[in-house]
Image (spheres, rainbow, N blue to C red):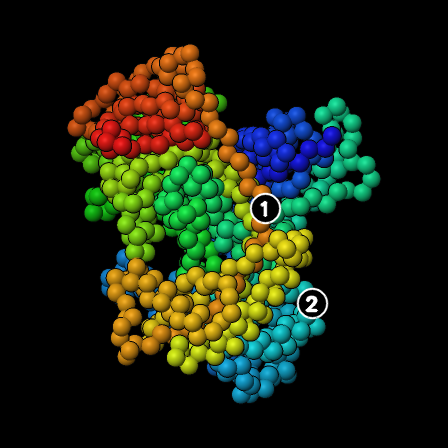
Amino acid sequence: MTRRIRIGIDTGGTFTDVVALDEDSGELVTTKTPSTPGNPADGFLAGVSKVLDLMDASGDDISAVSHGTTVATNKLLEGKVEALGFITTEGYEFILEIARQAVPDGYGNSYFWVKPPRIVPADRVKTVGGRIDFQGKEIRPFDEDRAVQVARWFKGRGITTIGVCFLHSYADDGHERAMRAILRREHPDAVVSISSEVLREYREYERSMTTLVDAAVKPSVSRYVANIRTRLTEFVSQTPGPSGEDTGGGAPRVLPFWVMKSNGGVLSADEVVNQPITTVLSGPAAGALGAGLIASRAGFDRVLTCDGGGTSTDVSVVLAGEPTLTTEGTVGAYPSKIPMIDVVTVGAGGGSIAWISPEGSLKVGPQSAGADPGPLCYAKGGTEATITDAHLTLGRIPPHLLGGEIPLDVEAARAGVAALADRLGLDLQRCATGILEISAWNQANALRQVSVKRGLDVRDFMLATFGGSGSLLACRLVDILGLAGVVVPQHPGNVSAFGLLTVDVKNDYVQTAVARHHALDHAAVQRTFDELTARAASALGAEGFPSDAHRYTRTVDLRYFGQAYEVRVAAPEGLVDEGYAADIASRFHDEHRALYGYDFRDDPRQQVEWVNLRITGIGPITRPTLPQLADAATSPATVAERAHRGRRPVCFDSDDGDVETDLWWRPALLAGDTIEGPAVIEEFGSTVPLHPGFRLRVDALGNLVITKSSEATEA
């Protein structure tokens, strides 16, 4: 009998992580396979084949595949965008140059800051006459003759990727659609993005940049998704069943193939090529969702997530199981105002390089040794000490990775850290602990950005750590930030892939409609909500969801009159009338106070202004049930008999030196087991150093719950 197996695949720089769910039995199977940067589809299909073998299943049993990809992210981070053209309103050709005239944090004096190159050089920016005002009224007609000249100019120079952003096209997109029609006629090979379809929201610079980013990644995302789709279809039609028979049986089966979006939803592969910008945070979004769901099921509703990889660490905040969203995100040097999970990335991964500044200070990252050549201990040609080398030098990780599959060169790591220590005039252990201390503070600062800077008290939060290196500094982060504790899920290296099995189909729609609260046209707001909801319903229907399964959420962006930026508040269902509007305004005052410490609720001189109306359409999927771990009370063996794996010297603090530390094998731990630090808990894909003064408890779902020993005793 054919089974229903849903597969989540997260492609990283070193490994492709795979999690499969049998939708009938609830069985969850995880595995890893090496990534293949030359052709990611090879590693993708290898992962699918490997997990099916582990489940004794065939391609015919796959019900759907969800995928997290970094294609768009890497394209932007590396700045390797293809030749790109920009068409805007006559007189506004320097939108990209003027930008926001803002100097990034860290440059106290703008004299020392050099503005980076624009995404489109000035000589590839063309303008077309015509003007729409902010209410959607045409002031000057669209100049078709000039539009034809511009289209032919780009065609003559072989520029085939073009973004179009006309002033106030969020209010009326007639001129943009006319420009696209001319481009299709005069330059049919061009890939075109128009701002009214990418971001129907005001602020011409952000809308221009978001549109250009969408256009820039569209060719590479389209090629990547098409390649995966083709290979997956071939695999499903050609893979023999468990007994060896061919299950193809005629025409290839079209398999549901979903791609992770930055907003915490998924989108069909067929549609994602039309909205490629929505995938720019595809990988980190899946990890935040997976960790949020696991922590929520474990009883923790206020969680900070810490996803540690080889190059960087991604952090986010999760409230009641849902990651918070932002529209003020950036990818590399490029702002993108699409809704995305509020993720902050810091260059503090396992491969981050330790170096000495010209002033003689020890620095860590953001430069990374990556996976090739990697840290010194990989013995693949690395020449500089990294965070992984420091952990290995101090004994905090074992002399191998992946349960022994990848041996590590301890002496090479120690020699590299010793050379750095000599230059700094430090001993070996003090240098290694210094490297990790800097890394911990880098991660702590990122966690503060998503919590303290958002008006949240970090002391109320648990930290959910995952990824290969996410848990290595967990105890130190508790000390630095005063966190409530740490949750380490089962199979932490596969949490991002697991997150892909927990996400709904989700589409966001926005319309700018600026109005003062006291003069708000309630009927007009209702009409806009209805129009956006109809668009969301149409998209969900096209994705195969019946109308009775559709769910919608509303949000509104508001501000005090005269402010430059808005605060987003949740808006309930219901008819928009005076009472409804008053409730939204009250929510805005509350959110403003939470973010900034004050509000003007009782000051009639400060007027509230409505700015953007938003609808999110959601097509829900069935989330996997997390299996319960066997209770330690039912085991005849003690925790030491089951899980103790010996001892080794570990340095947790350079002042204390090496401490003989117990080693524990995580797969042998059962619910209810407790371990006191110092200890090191090892498993196939990650390691958790448990510092002195900390206690670990295994909960019913197999999570490692870490707290300060005194707090654990009081609890």
Residue 406 position in % (x across, y down): 46, 24
User: Element type at marker 2?
Assistant: loop
Please give left or right for residue 593 compared with residue 210 in the image: left
Residue 11 position in % (x across, y down): 53, 40
Which residue shows up at 30% across the image and 52% down it?
456
- Asked whether residue 356 is in view, the answer is no
Please give left or right for residue 220 compared with residue 700 in the image: right
Which residue shows up at 29% across the image and 39% down it?
484
User: Element type at marker 1?
Assistant: loop
Look at the numbered discs 2 and 1 and tell me whether their residues touch, using CB distance below 8 Å.
Answer: no
- For marks 2 and 1 on the same chain, the one whose residue lies earlier in the sequence: 2
In this rendering, the answer to whether 616 lies above or below 388 is: below
Q: In which quarter of the image is residue 194?
A: bottom right
Which residue shows up at 56% across the image and 78% down it?
172
Say which of 150 and 555 sits in front. 555
Give the farthest residue toward the right.
Answer: 250
Say which of 575 and 170 sits in front. 575
Tag 1 residue: 621
Which residue shows up at 50% across the image and 63% down it?
573
Tag 2 residue: 188
Amino acid bearing label 2: Pro
Residue 683 position in % (x across, y down): 43, 25
Looking at the image, is mark 2 or mark 1 nearer the viewer? 1
- Asked whether residue 226 is in view, the answer is yes
Please give left or right for residue 491 compared with residue 220 in the image: left
Say few, some or many: other residues with alpha carbon within 10 Å of mark 2 (under 14 / 14 to 19 / 20 or more).
some
The quarter of the image holding the N terminus is top right
Amino acid bearing label 1: Ile
Q: In which quarter of the image is residue 327?
A: bottom left
